[in-house]
Image (cartoon, rainbow, N blue to C red):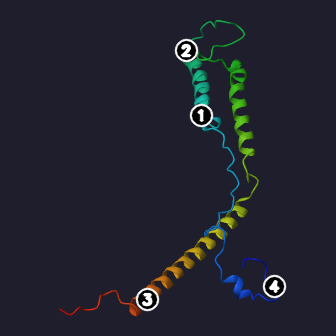
Amino acid sequence: MSGPNTPHLPLSASASFPPTGPVTPAPPQQPAEPQLPSPSTFDVLPDLHRLLNRLMNTAAQPPAPTPTPGKPSDDGPLEIQQLATAATELKLKIQKARRAVMALPDIDRSCEDQQEEIEYLEARIARQKAALQSLAQSGDEADHNLLRQYPTTPPATKE
């Protein structure tokens, strides 16, 4: 009787049978969350601190000979002339972080768009809460009515 309605089969007859599928519908498929970049992608402060510390140490210490004339050491004092070369790695890391941010979904959305979506979702949550409270209240009333019709106290027995 779960076939399509025919002129000989009223709509109410086909609707009175339970569904043949699962009782609760499956939740809609959510798109997979995009893979976020690692936190180290955005952690440029230690590298910047190290670079600035090397630059500050130059002013406090007398110049020392470098092991190789063309390449300064990675942890020794840094002369101002070597700053651009030493900052290249930091610049590349910042560019990589910038590209990672631009690859995130919805990055082009304005604050107004996001605020509108937040308001819509908050209103939707409020409607769902109200519906749940209404269902709970009607369920409580139904339980109360059933208890009045069919009391749970057993009848007194004669001894």
Residue name at image x 62 percent, y 33 percent: 44
Task: Kindly report which numbered mark, 2 or 3, lies closer to the viewer in this rendering.
Answer: 3
Residue name at image x 75 percent, y 89 percent: 10
Residue 23 lies, with reference to residue 105, above or below; the image says below
- Separation of disc 1 and disc 2 at Cα? 24 Å
Disc 2 secondary structure class:
loop
- In the rendered structure, find residue 6 and report the number of the disc placed on it: 4
Task: Kindly report which numbered mark, 1 or 4, lies closer to the viewer in this rendering.
Answer: 4
Position of residue 113 in the picture relative to residue 75 (left or right) = right
Dot 3 crowding, Cα within 10 Å, few <14, some 14–19, many 20+:
few
The amino acid type of the residue labelled 1 equals Leu
Dot 4 crowding, Cα within 10 Å, few <14, some 14–19, many 20+:
few
Residue name at image x 66 percent, y 43 percent: 36
The amino acid type of the residue labelled 3 equals Leu
Q: Earlier in the sequence, mark 1 or mark 3?
A: 1
| Residues at circles 4 and 3 in contact by the CB criterion of under 8 Å | no
The amino acid type of the residue labelled 2 equals Gln
Disc 4 secondary structure class:
loop
Residue 133 lies, with reference to residue 109, above or below; the image says below
Please tell me in which quadrant of the rendered image residue 128 appears: bottom right
Please tell me in which quadrant of the rendered image residue 11 appears: bottom right
Q: Earlier in the sequence, mark 4 or mark 3?
A: 4
- In the rendered structure, find residue 61 and report the number of the disc placed on it: 2
Task: Kindly report which numbered mark, 4 or 2, lies closer to the viewer in this rendering.
Answer: 4
- Separation of disc 4 and disc 3 at Cα? 38 Å
Task: Please name the residue that numbered disc 3 is placed on.
Answer: 146
Task: Please name the residue that numbered disc 1 is placed on.
Answer: 45
- Separation of disc 1 and disc 4 at Cα? 73 Å
- Separation of disc 1 and disc 3 at Cα? 67 Å
- Separation of disc 2 and disc 3 at Cα? 90 Å
Position of residue 34 in the picture relative to residue 142 (left or right) = right
